[in-house]
Amino acid sequence: MPSDMTFRTLLRPAALVMALALCPLVAAAQEPDERDLQALRFYMNENNEQAIQSELRRLQIQFPAWTPPADLDALDETVPSEAIERIYSLIADEDYAGAREAIADTGREYPDWSPSSDLLTALSLAESQSEFNQAVLAGNRQAAIRIARSTPALLSCERVNNAWQLAEQYEALGDAASALVVYRGIAGSCTDVDVLIATLEKSAASANATQLAELADTMRVRVPDAEGRLSVVENRLRAGLGADPRELPGVPLSNAPLTALEVPLAPTPEVRPSARPANLGVVPVRRSAPASTGSSSGSGSGGGGGAVSPSVARAAQAGDWQTCLALTANARAAEDISQRGWCAFNAGRPMQALRDFRSATANARNATLRRDSAYGMALTMMRLRMVNEAAAVAASTDFTYDQRLEVESEILDARGVAAYNRGEYRRAIGYFNEYERLTGRVRRDLAMLRGYAYLNSGQKAKAAAEFQRLHDQLATPETRAALSTALR
C-alpha cells in the first residue's frame, strides 16, 4: 500500500493551493533550502546510510547546480536536532497534542522551518494507531473499521496485528466476506512465513474449505520455501472444517511421513480430565539444569534453557508463587523472567504471565528457553480465551511433542465448543473429530456436545450411536435424555 497515502490526506485545500503557487519558485531555485534538506538531515540523524545516499541523488537531480559538501556535517541545521527529537519523543509518549504544539512552537521560533512529510506522517500514523487500539479495546467495532479503512498505512505487513484485529471486528459483526478480504490482502502482500501461517490459522474462523485452499495456494506461491509448513497447517485446518485433506506440495498424501503432531495416539477407553491450563495438577517449573540436558517441558516442567537462582527455584518447586514473584520482581535475565511467568500463571495472574512469557520469548538466549517460554505464552493465551493468538504461536513454534499435543488439543477443544455455540454444528463435529484423532480419545463433555451436533445437523443415527456409547460407559440422566431425543 502506498506509504504516502496518509500524508496526502493531511493536505488542506488552502495548503495545496499554496504549494502549487510555490512550484515556480522551487523550480527556479539553484540550491536546496532548509525545507529541502529536512529529509536528508533526518536520515543523517538516524545514521541510515542507504537513505542518505538515495536522498542525495534526489537532491542532485532536483538541483543540478548544487554540489553537496564533502563533509555532510557542514550542512548545519538551522533547527537544533534537540527540538526535532523532542517532537518525536512526544509522539512516542502518545502526547499528540503536545507534539502538535511543539511543531507550532518550533515553526514560530524558526520561521524558515516547516515539518517534514516524514514527521507529519509519523504523527498522523501514531495518532491513528492509538485511536484504532482504543476502539478495539472498547469494543467499538464500527469505529475500529472506519479508522483502519481511512488509514491504509495501519494495515502494512509491519503492522499485521492491525489487519488481524480488523478481520476480527468484521467477524464479530458477522461479516465473514469482509474478514476474508483482509486475510486475502495479507496473503497477497506479506512474505513472512510466520505471519502467513498465523493468518491461515485465523482465517479458519471465516473461511470454508475452498476459501481456505485459495488462501493457502496464494501463500505457497508467495513463499515457495515454506510450502510444506503451509500445507501441514492447511490440512489440519481442513480437518477442523470437516473437509478431506488435500494432496499438497511439500506433503503429498501418498508418501508423506507423519509429523509428531499428526501421529494418532493409541486409543484407550480411559476418559481423561480436561487438559485446560486451569486444571494442571503439576505446575510448570523452570529447572536449573542446563539446556543441553534436554529436560522435559510438558505440563510437569518449564523445561531447560538456563539457570535461575536457587531461592527462586526452591520457591517454584514448593509452589510458593508469591515468594517466587517477589524474588523475581526486578528480574532482567530471560530465564528468571520466564520462571516469573510460570509463577504468575499458577498464581492466577495471567496478564502478568503473558507479559513475562512474551518478554522471555523475545529475549531468550537459546532455542530451548525460547520454545518453552512460547509454550507458556500459548497456555496463558488459552486461559485468557485468546484462541487465535495461541494458534498463531503454535503455528510458528517448534514445540516438543507433548507441548504441541497439549496446546493443539486446547485449541481444537475451544474452537469446537465455540463453533457449537454459534450453531455451526458440522464445523464443531470436525473439530471434535480432529481432537479425538490427535489425542486418541475424546472427553465425555465433548462427546456429548458432538452427539448433539450430530443431532442438530440431521445425523440422528450418528447421534444415537454416540449417546449409546456414552450411556453404556456410564448411564446418567443426561445420557438417557439424549438417547430418548435421538431415538424419537
Image: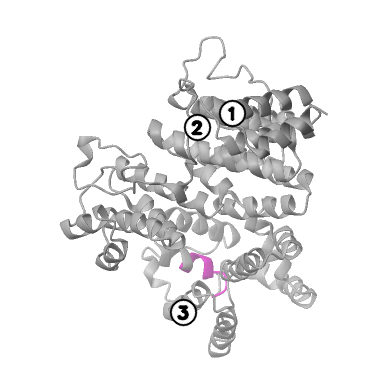
Judged left or right of residue 328, residue 187 is right
Q: Nearer the viewer, residue 296 or 203?
A: 296
**Secondary structure category for the residue under label 1:** helix
Dot label at residue 434: 1
Q: Is residue 315 visible?
A: yes
Where does residue 329 sit, x and y in percent of width and height? 29, 68
Residue named by callout 2: 271
Q: Nearer the viewer, residue 85 or 405?
A: 405
At 55% from the left edge and 35% from the top edge, which residue is drawn? 443
Whole-number angstrom distance, CA of label 3 to CA of label 1: 55 Å
Work out whether mark 3 precedes mark 1 in sequence or the reverse, and give the earlier one: 3
At 64% from the left edge and 52% from the top edge, which residue is drawn? 163
Amino acid carrying label 1: it is Glu
Give the residues drawn in magenta, as a range. Answer: 34-41
Image quarter of residue 402: top left
- Asked whether 39 falls inside the magenta stretch, the response is yes
Amino acid carrying label 2: it is Val
Look at the image and name its color scheme. Answer: one colour
